[in-house]
Amino acid sequence: MKLDYVLLLLFHLCFVNTELISVITGKIKDSGTTIAISAGAFWGLKDRLKCYLYECCHEPDVNFNYHTLDADIANLLFGQHLVKDVVVNSIKSHWYNENPRKPLVLSFHGYTGSGKNYVAEIIANNTFRLGLRSTFVQHIVATNDFPDKNKLEEYQVELRNRILTTVQKCQRSIFIFDEADKLPEQLLGAIKPFLDYYSTISGVDFRRSIFILLSNKGGGEIARITKEQYESGYPREQLRLEAFERELMNFSYNEKGGLQMSELISNHLIDHFVPFLPLQREHVRSCVGAYLRKRGRGDLVSNVDFVERVLNSLQYFPESSKAFSSSGCKRVDAKTDLEMAKIRPLLSSVHFDDEL
């Protein structure tokens, strides 16, 4: 309402002050066209002012950048060659398709700390100016947003309305379902119409939206395949999506959890099952280096003893080789901060006494 009052005031000023019209429109004609110019200036100004105060579904608020998405995943994500190949190209293809048949649906699988949330954040950052803070990005955490199993019917209505109202504002909306494996089957089933091959639902076109499901389910199968590749002496980079996708599809369909028997799978609405491989020590080392640079301590990256202390503070599996990090890079920040605190010089007692 406040915006409307401001705009009405500006319209009045435009009508009575031709100089202001010329400032807004860049030109002015004779007095007989003042009203027409004022009306055009008013509506143009309204749109500009609205998008200045609030987020709008066009540039610069929405500005997908394929090149920076590709570069960010290549430079900020470690040990996940399959993610880069599938995610970057599927989003690029979907974004530049002028008439997609359905929304893009990606299902991320893997152990904690392998980068699932991080990649979802990178996608949001390279689509919306505000990233995850954008009103067009809905980050839904199963255990936080839907904690009470006795309110499933209420949650179904709430979830449908949340999705519908978001896409009404912007067809390019992104929905991130964290802990999707903990969502009751009824809730994932409730969003099925939004992911299907419909041109509109309740008058809203969902085909340009993106849905991302994050799950720890299948992490064991992914680790088994990756471990076999490692023990056979072959580089993990030789692993292909085909080695995982069928396993993940079957596992997600049959294993107890949110995706069990879900219509999303049986109706083939999930476009890509994306495996996040367990990280090896070398990948965790890269995470430590990236965090040190972020903290402005790039000088410690080459400090072998320091980095090794951080790496040795983490747990690895299997017991025989300890080739893979149990927590991926998830605990790297905390462990690195702890080691930095140990080497940070303390204030001397003299300085302390001076302060007193």
Image: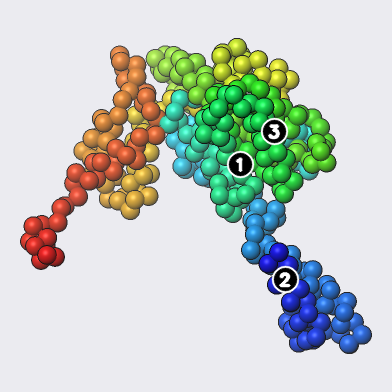
Mark before the other along the chain sequence, 2 or 1: 2
Image coordinates of residue 287 in percent, x first then y, are 38, 38
Q: Residue at x 70, y 27 (%)?
A: 190
> How many labels sit on residues?
3
Q: Quadrant of the C terminus?
A: bottom left
Gap in Å between the C-alphas at discs 2 and 1? Answer: 31 Å
Image coordinates of residue 110 in percent, x first then y, are 49, 25
> Which residue is under mark 1?
138
Q: Quadrant of the N terminus?
A: bottom right
Image coordinates of residue 292 in percent, x first then y, are 33, 46
> Which residue is under mark 3?
157
Q: Residue at x 23, y 35 (%)?
A: 309
Q: Amino acid at mark 3?
A: Val
Residues 237 and 280: in front is: 280
> Which residue is under mark 2?
5
Residues 243 and 150: in front is: 150
Q: Amino acid at mark 2?
A: Tyr
Q: Amino acid at mark 1?
A: Gln
